[in-house]
Image (tube, rainbow, N blue to C red):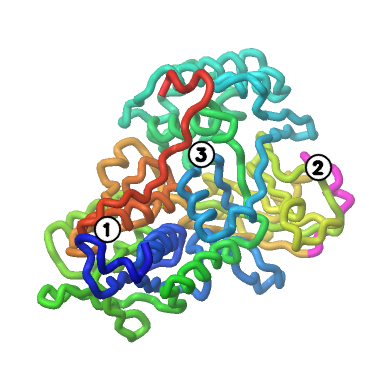
Amino acid sequence: MTAASISSTPGIRKTQHVVTIVGGGVAGLTAACALADAGFRVQVLERRSYPGGRASSYLHPGTGEVIDNCQHVLFGCCTNLIDLYQRIGVADKIFWDSKMTLIEPGGRRSVLAPSSLPAPMHGLPGILKSNCFSLADKFSIIFALVSVMLKKKQDPDEDLASWLKSHRQTRGAMNRFWWLVIASALNADLDQIAMPYAAKVIRELFLNSANAGSMGMSTVPLSDLYRGAEDYLKARHSEIIYNANVDAAEWDEEAQLWTVTAAGKPYVSESLILALPFEATAKLLPKMPANEDAIQLAEELKKLEHWPICSVHLWFDREITELPHAVLLDRDIHWMYHKSRWQPQRNSNASYIELVVSVSREFAALSREQALARAIEQLAEFFPEVKKAKIVKSALIKEVRATFGVPPGIDAVRPSAVSPWPNCFLAGDWIATGWPSTMESAARSGYLAAEALCNNLGDDRQLLVADLKPTGLMRFFC
């Protein structure tokens, strides 16, 4: 729908409807692009000088390099995030890989990759051939995967640790598969993950289809990736306003208008979307119109919790491995991303490595020198070339609010896109999307907020993209 045709749409005003979106992260950008495409004039207020929110990049002052605040990964099952990338014309800037290489200290490798077998058996040969799992480990993992496959609904009050114990998982399976691949992917301890969310990840990454589990990474810095949304909005008479830290928001009942004040400047609109992390939303609530539902929302937000992620960035004078990425077993560092392998702007004769430590409260407590020394020492256990290489520069990034937790009972405090105020809607990976804390959850929330706004105006359009359909035999277990 274009701006010219919006006047003929039932339920939408004849004058162009203006929407203010607070927050230029994935959630806010997704909502903004969808609404701009539907003919609304959108103004996005972003407190930073670049887009992407927690999925952003910046010029690191100590290294002179543009780095991401943390490595963000998407999967083939992230249908709404992929839809956003296609919408803003950056889908070709994603490097896809269906292989997951697990490396033991000393360098022995195992590869989990899809075979030609139909789902859910496509991943079976990879598990059976893996050197890092004992025979008992393999059978216990397969037993658990089959259990998830056969049971469509999981108990929302059960945590993953209890479920794994009841399904007789071996120590090797716990440490090298469930804890590392699942818990670190969700960035939380096993006993802090509600079983439905664990089952969601297991089904999508290992059971539903080979395409669903493919891993994607941006070939450009994240803020460059999301600048595609800025161009998309400009072409549709909308905009992102940077360095616009919101001070307050007021609702005029008589005029049916919102006035959002940012950096001392007022922004007036008919509708408002708050697309902020839950802590930022909580800080803004006292500056919003007071009512009982807003008080209830504030109480619910207190029950949400963020978990940190640490990332170590290392630049070597030579290539230390041919692998584009890997899972590192039995050590503090969990994931290795060889970004110079899939970011063409990097020096291909050297190595720019990002190491990610999930569930990292202990690691986050280390000093910069301690964290770097530990990471480099452990990296050399997996890649001997590290001992011969020279470290040109390094950086340690501690993202203390990287993801929110999804413990048992979390769904009771995740709100819908409808807010306590008129013509105001909520977006963010923490609202009720059915997904854990991911870019996909953020994208889904943006579409849900845009849908709710349209529905409020009598337009019943559907923007949320359906989940990727299971293939093979999994079609009969979903």
Label 1 vs label 2, nearer the camera: 1
* Quadrant of the image containing the C terminus: top left
| Real-space Cα separation, disc 3 to disc 2, in angstroms | 31 Å
Question: Residue 278: x, y in percent?
Answer: 35, 58
The residue nearer to you, when weighing 345 against 198, is 345
Instruction: Name the residue type under label 2.
Output: Phe
Instruction: Name the residue type under label 3.
Output: Cys
> At 18% across and 63% down in the image, what residue appears?
421
**Mark 2 = which residue?**
383
**Mark 1 = which residue?**
454
Residue 16 visible in image = yes
- Residue 390 magenta-highlighted: yes
| Real-space Cα separation, disc 1 to disc 2, in angstroms | 53 Å
> At 37% across and 51% down in the image, what residue appears?
463
Q: Secondary structure at mark 1?
A: helix
Rate crowding at label 3 as few (under 14), some (14 to 19) or many (20 or more) other CA atoms within 10 Å: many
Question: Residue 96: x, y in percent?
Answer: 65, 44
Instruction: Name the residue type under label 1.
Output: Cys
